[in-house]
Image: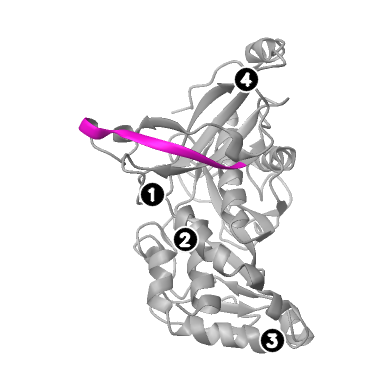
């Protein structure tokens, strides 16, 4: 089954129409009740906002997003981060929002609220993050993009960072996404083809504190929208294909000011020691289903650690925490937490890392 597609050439005629100077289209973006689904709706503003907080609070029907009952369904969108809209161009904006319930309390899937509180407490430590977002492209029928319909591609080996029509599938989507992120102001810093064919990765960072979650969610939204234009589906499932195929993660690179300074390796080692004492808490925070999604991926095989054990090592991609070899040689830098799943909430991930390593909570 092919994706239902409209004629993009026809659309271009309308996108070229003049937009009044005093009208701005603001696309409000939020996370639904699944903790990973993205929802959006558009609002016309009669001014160009300079900051997200200038945008009005809005509402939507939470009973249609797994967040409320029909008898009391109003949910509220509080704008908190803003990007340029790479699809509509001009003055138009993308607005990342926090979700609040009718009683002004944050929705259960509003992990940004507590993440912001934690980042404010740890501000003097200047926590930096970079997240490597892996994802898989699918045909509209759910089959991995580029895979034979009645079989499998050749074994893993030639696909990682590969070049050539027989090694990578969907590069047009990757290129379009990268350029759209740059146009939006997302701090995207790289991309590459991954180990499983049809699987890719982009990296966002370094971002300080709460900005990590804001930029990654914006990048995810842009990825889904770009893929939509190509009639291709993006999945963040951490193990989209069972068997001898790599899963998908969101490896999280992390450092504080102390780690980045001379002899910061000691601070890194102290952080790893703290992380080792809270393995279960982190596993529960690293996917939206409290470890159930990641359990299919963190098996100890295919460049992963076991979900049941904590481990750390230099240049070890089979460990929970990897210290890059260059960091070990330099005696300062950052650590990589390889446990977060591809469908993680970056607000939850960055919050728990800072709680454990900085606030010691």
The dot on residue 106 is: 1
The answer to whether the residue labelled 1 contacts the one labelled 3, judged by CB atoms less than 8 Å apart, is: no
Residue to which mark 2 is pinned: 348
| Mark before the other along the chain sequence, 2 or 1 | 1
Q: Percent position (x, y) of residue 194?
A: 62, 57
Q: Mark yes or no: residue 131 visible.
A: yes
- Up-down: is 213 above or below 227? below
Q: What element carries label 2?
A: helix
| Mark before the other along the chain sequence, 4 or 1 | 4
Front of the two marks 2 and 1: 1
The dot on residue 349 is: none
| Mark before the other along the chain sequence, 1 or 3 | 1
Residue to which mark 4 is pinned: 46
| Mark before the other along the chain sequence, 3 or 2 | 3
Callout 1 crowding tier (Cα within 10 Å): few <14, some 14–19, many ≥20: some
Q: Which of 13 and 232 is in front in this view?
A: 13
Front of the two marks 2 and 4: 4
The answer to whether the residue labelled 2 contacts the one labelled 4, judged by CB atoms less than 8 Å apart, is: no
Work out how far the residue at label 2 is from the one at label 4, CA to CA, in angstroms.
35 Å
Q: Percent position (x, y) of residue 212?
A: 61, 56
Residue to which mark 3 is pinned: 265
Work out how far the residue at label 3 is from the one at label 2, CA to CA, in angstroms.
25 Å
Callout 2 crowding tier (Cα within 10 Å): few <14, some 14–19, many ≥20: many
Q: Indicate the quadrant where residue 268 lies.
A: bottom right
**58 inside magenta stretch:** no
Front of the two marks 1 and 3: 1
Work out how far the residue at label 4 is from the one at label 1, CA to CA, in angstroms.
28 Å
Q: What stretch is highlighted in magenta?
A: 71-81
């Amino acid at each position: 089954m092919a994706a239902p597609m409209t004629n993009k050439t026809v659309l271009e005629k309308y996108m070229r129409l003049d937009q009044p100077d005093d009208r701005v289209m603001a696309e409000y973006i939020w996370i639904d009740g699944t903790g990973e689904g993205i929802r959006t709706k558009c609002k016309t503003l009669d001014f160009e906002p300079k900051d997200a907080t200038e945008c009005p609070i809005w509402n939507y029907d939470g009973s249609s997003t797994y967040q409320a009952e029909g008898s009391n369904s109003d949910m509220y969108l509080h704008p908190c981060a803003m990007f340029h809209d790479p699809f509509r161009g001009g003055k138009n904006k993308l607005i990342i929002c926090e979700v609040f319930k009718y009683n002004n309390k944050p929705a259960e899937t509003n992990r940004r609220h507590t993440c912001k509180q934690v980042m404010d407490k740890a501000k003097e430590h200047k926590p930096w993050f970079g997240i490597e977002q892996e994802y898989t492209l699918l045909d509209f029928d759910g089959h991995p993009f580029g895979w034979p319909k009645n079989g499998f591609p050749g074994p893993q080996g030639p696909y990682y960072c590969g070049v050539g029509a027989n090694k990578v599938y969907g590069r047009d989507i990757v290129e379009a996404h990268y350029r759209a992120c740059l146009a939006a102001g997302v701090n995207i810093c790289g991309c590459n083809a991954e180990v499983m064919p049809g699987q890719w990765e982009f990296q966002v960072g370094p971002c300080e504190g709460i900005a990590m979650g804001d930029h990654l969610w914006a990048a995810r939204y842009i990825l889904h929208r770009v893929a939509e234009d190509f009639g291709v589906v993006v999945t963040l499932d951490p193990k989209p294909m069972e068997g001898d195929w790599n899963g998908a993660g969101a490896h999280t690179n992390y450092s504080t000011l102390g780690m980045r300074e001379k002899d910061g390796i000691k601070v890194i080692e102290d952080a790893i020691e703290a992380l080792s004492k809270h393995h279960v808490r982190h596993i529960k925070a690293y996917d939206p289903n409290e470890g159930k999604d990641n359990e299919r991926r963190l098996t100890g095989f295919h460049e992963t650690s076991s979900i049941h054990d904590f481990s750390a090592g230099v240049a070890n991609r089979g460990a929970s925490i990897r210290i890059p070899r260059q960091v070990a040689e330099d005696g300062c830098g950052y650590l990589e937490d390889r446990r977060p799943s591809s469908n993680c909430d970056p607000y939850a991930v960055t919050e728990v890392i800072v709680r454990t390593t900085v606030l010691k909570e």
